[in-house]
Every structure is written in structure tokens, then in C-alpha cells.
Image: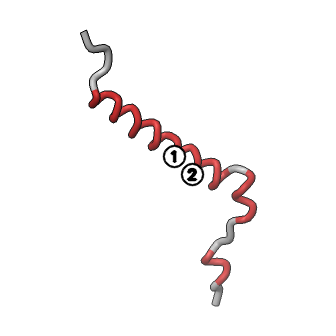
Amino acid sequence: METTSPAMSVALAVLAVLLGLTGFGIYTAFGPPSKQLSDPFDDHED
């Protein structure tokens, strides 16, 4: 009996990539790298 179907492996890989990118985005937005981000609205004030 087969333990894992190929579709389940692909689904888990896609889920892992999605969670990784989400975690990286949150870390970049709210973690230490966020200090280097600039606000484009503040850069172009009239």
C-alpha cells in the first residue's frame, strides 16, 4: 500500500512555500529590517 500520494506531496510543498513567504513578509514588514523601509507617501509630500 502506498503511504503518500504525489498530489499530497505537491500540496504540502506548496503549503510550505506559502507559509515561508508569508513568514518572511511579516518578518520584513515588522521585524528589524523594517527600520530600513521608507514610506513613499512621506517621500513625496507637497
Which residue is at a point 52% across and 42% down the rendered structure image? Answer: 20
Question: Please, is residue 8 above or below residue 14 in the view?
Answer: above
Left or right of residue 8: residue 27: right
Left or right of residue 45: residue 14: left
Which residue is at a point 49% across and 40% down the rendered structure image? Answer: 19
**Residues at badges 2 and 1 in contact (C-beta under 8 Å)?**
yes
Q: Position of residue 7 (x, y in %)?
A: 27, 31
> For the view shown, which residue lies furthest in the top direction?
1
Q: Quadrant of residue 4?
A: top left
Q: Residues within 10 Å of mark 1 (few under 14, many from 20)?
A: few
SS category of the residue bearing label 1: helix
Amino acid at the residue labelled 1: Thr
Q: Quadrant of residue 45?
A: bottom right
The N terminus is located in which quarter? top left
Q: Which residue is labeled 1 in the image? A: 22
Q: Which residue is labeled 2 in the image? A: 25
> For the view shown, which residue lies furthest in the bottom direction?
46
Q: Position of residue 5 (x, y in %)?
A: 27, 23
Q: Nearer the viewer, residue 15 or 6?
A: 6
The C terminus is located in which quarter? bottom right
Q: Residues within 10 Å of mark 2 (few under 14, many from 20)?
A: few
Which residue is at a point 46% across and 42% down the rendered structure image? Answer: 17
SS category of the residue bearing label 2: helix
Amino acid at the residue labelled 2: Gly
Q: Position of residue 2 (x, y in %)?
A: 27, 14
Which residue is at a point 28% across and 29% down the rendered structure image? Answer: 6
Alpha carbon distance from label 2 to label 1: 5 Å
Q: Nearer the viewer, residue 22 or 42?
A: 22
Left or right of residue 35: residue 40: left
Question: Please, is residue 9 above or below residue 43 in the view?
Answer: above
Question: Please, is residue 23 above or below residue 10 in the view?
Answer: below
> For the view shown, which residue lies furthest in the left direction?
1
